[in-house]
Image (cartoon, rainbow, N blue to C red):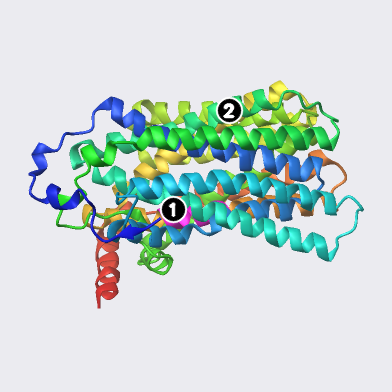
């Protein structure tokens, strides 16, 4: 697997005027979206199936389960390296596509090996005692998920760069919007496929049967995801990429290092307030990632197949929220008020999810997740739209890139925090409903704190001060 410094297409492309390279049409945009769909499908395996099996069936402590899974999010800073690699070195003859294919193959393979380590961890806990062997399996599982995250970055970062390469200012937002929406479609489809493949597992099925069916799932679904990654990108870079003829560097989020991200996000008083709001909002929005399916299993007595579909209900609600907010809600209320409405809606929905637990009615939980997804869609759209408005165009690429990296780490913290709070809840509270309820209540309180921070955001002050503050940081980076 050799790399070279010069793309075979670069030399010929440099003599070709930009206008002679065809623009990506709608069908190609949706085809590119198949890559994000594949990532959505894969996310179901980690935070839709494995989290449930580890916490509920294998009785792995929630903090350990969430912490090991979150390792794939904690390694997000490596995407800077893969972004730079794909700029300077070709792989399989391409600047972007080769990395996408190799990364996709690796994350498909590593995911299967990760689940084999999960079984060994579970078996080591059968005696009820924590042993040195158990600690070894935990360390190995954390390493497997870190490798999984690196493989995801190796594939997704060059793919994001490919989106920049094949688009222009006039069609980039449409391309990114379509591709991002396909991620949620992938989560819904992944939940449906996984649920169908796991239907044979009854609520109290023997562990051996669970193991056989999960192993089968982790063979079939990653193969599907890898196929979608190939189908999404084959031929696109060669036909549509403008990389070889562009002499200026375009802002891309994978160019931002973690240190630079933190300096940009705390550049002025207003950027610090807004960044803190976004951080607390994100953690509060995703703390349930690792514990939602175990909640369905332990409190609602749902099978693994049934809890896997919970992601589909949340995904449908999110898609509705994203769509309606952009077209109907934000234009009428304004972006800041839309974000406030979303935060309040999320807090209310989290208490409805707690209420659903007191009834142990799965239908109640499913409907509450649709509402929660809708409120999450409203919050996300409002907050991201507000962020785009808050900073000057000259520094927007840098600010968004810094936030993109910070958000990946915020989601990792959210996953670990959810497991930690559940562990505390199970220790000090009498029933599973109360223990899981503590996680959702913590999220609701966090969302109300975020709401208070949002009220302190001054758009005028932000626009006056942030541009100069961020520019001074960028200048110091060049010195």
- Tell me the chief SS of the magenta region: helix
The range drawn in magenta is 404-412
Q: Which mark is residue 305?
A: none
Q: Residues within 10 Å of mark 1 (few under 14, many from 20)?
A: many
Which numbered disc, 1 or 2, marks the residue that appears first in the sequence? 1
Classify residue 34 by image quadrant: top left
Location of the N terminus (image quadrant): bottom left
Q: Residue 284: horizontal and vertical position, in percent?
A: 58, 48
Residue sitting farthest toward the right: 127
Instruction: Check disc 2 and report the residue beneath it.
Output: 312
- Looking at the image, residue 127 lies above or below residue 230: below
Q: Position of residue 162 (x, y in %)?
A: 30, 45
Q: Quadrant of residue 270?
A: bottom left
Residue 405 at least partly seen: yes
| Residue highlighted by disc 1 | 154
Please indicate, yes or no, whether residue 453 appears anywhere in the rendered image.
Answer: no
Q: Which residue sits at x=59%, y=37%?
A: 44
| Image vertical order of residue 157 relative to residue 179, above or below | below
Residue lying at the far front in this picture: please name it.
1
The spot of residue 97 in percent (x, y) is: 34, 45
Q: Residue at x 57, y 46 (%)?
A: 109
- The answer to whether the residues at label 1 and label 2 have Cβ atoms under 8 Å apart is no
Left or right: 338 as drawn, with respect to 252 = right
Secondary-structure class at tag 1: helix
Q: Is residue 247 left or right of residue 346?
A: left
Q: Is residue 140 magenta?
A: no
Q: In percent of the image, x 81 and y 45: which residue is there? A: 58
Give the camera-side residue of 90 and 70.
90
Q: Is residue 442 above or below residue 356?
A: below
């Amino acid at each position: 697997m050799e790399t070279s410094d010069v793309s075979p297409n670069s030399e010929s492309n440099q003599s070709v005027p930009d206008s002679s390279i065809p623009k990506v049409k709608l069908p190609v945009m949706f085809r590119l979206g198949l890559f994000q769909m594949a990532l959505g499908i894969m996310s179901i395996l980690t935070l839709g199936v494995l989290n449930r099996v580890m916490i509920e069936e294998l009785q792995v402590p929630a903090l350990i389960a969430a912490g090991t899974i979150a390792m794939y999010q904690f390694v997000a800073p490596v995407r800077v390296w893969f972004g730079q690699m794909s700029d300077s070195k070709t792989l399989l003859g391409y600047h972007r596509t080769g990395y996408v294919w190799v990364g996709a193959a690796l994350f498909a393979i590593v995911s299967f090996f990760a689940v084999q380590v999960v079984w060994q961890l579970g078996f080591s806990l059968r005696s009820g005692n924590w042993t040195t062997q158990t600690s070894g399996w935990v360390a190995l599982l954390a390493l497997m998920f870190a490798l999984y995250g690196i493989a995801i970055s190796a594939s997704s970062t060059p793919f994001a760069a490919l989106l920049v390469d094949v688009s222009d200012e006039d069609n980039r937002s449409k391309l990114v919007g379509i591709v991002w929406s396909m991620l949620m479609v992938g989560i819904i489809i992944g939940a449906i496929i996984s649920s169908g493949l796991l239907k044979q597992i009854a609520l109290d099925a023997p562990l051996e049967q669970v193991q056989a069916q999960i192993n089968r799932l982790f063979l079939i679904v990653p193969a599907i995801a890898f196929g979608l990654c190939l189908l999404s990108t084959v031929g696109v870079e060669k036909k549509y990429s403008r990389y070889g003829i562009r002499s200026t560097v375009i802002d891309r989020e994978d160019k931002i290092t973690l240190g630079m991200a933190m300096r940009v996000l705390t550049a002025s008083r207003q950027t610090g307030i807004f960044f803190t709001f976004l951080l607390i909002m994100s953690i509060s929005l995703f703390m349930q990632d690792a514990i939602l399916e175990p909640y369905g299993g332990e409190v609602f007595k749902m099978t693994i197949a049934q809890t896997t579909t919970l992601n589909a209900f949340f995904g449908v609600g999110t898609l509705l929220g994203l769509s309606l907010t952009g077209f109907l809600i934000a234009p009428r209320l304004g972006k800041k008020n839309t974000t406030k409405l979303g935060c309040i809606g999320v807090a209310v929905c989290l208490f409805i999810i707690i209420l659903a637990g007191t009834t142990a009615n799965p239908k109640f939980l499913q409907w509450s997740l649709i509402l929660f997804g809708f409120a999450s869609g409203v919050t996300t759209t409002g907050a991201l739209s507000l962020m785009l408005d808050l900073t000057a165009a000259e520094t927007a690429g840098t600010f968004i890139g810094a936030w993109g990296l910070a958000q990946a780490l915020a989601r990792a913290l959210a996953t670990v925090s959810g497991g930690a709070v559940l562990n505390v809840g199970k220790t000090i509270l009498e029933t599973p409903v109360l223990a899981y309820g503590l996680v959702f209540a913590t999220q609701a309180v966090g969302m109300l704190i975020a709401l208070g921070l949002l009220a302190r955001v001054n758009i005028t002050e932000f626009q006056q001060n942030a541009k100069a503050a961020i520019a001074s940081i960028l200048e110091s980076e060049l010195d």
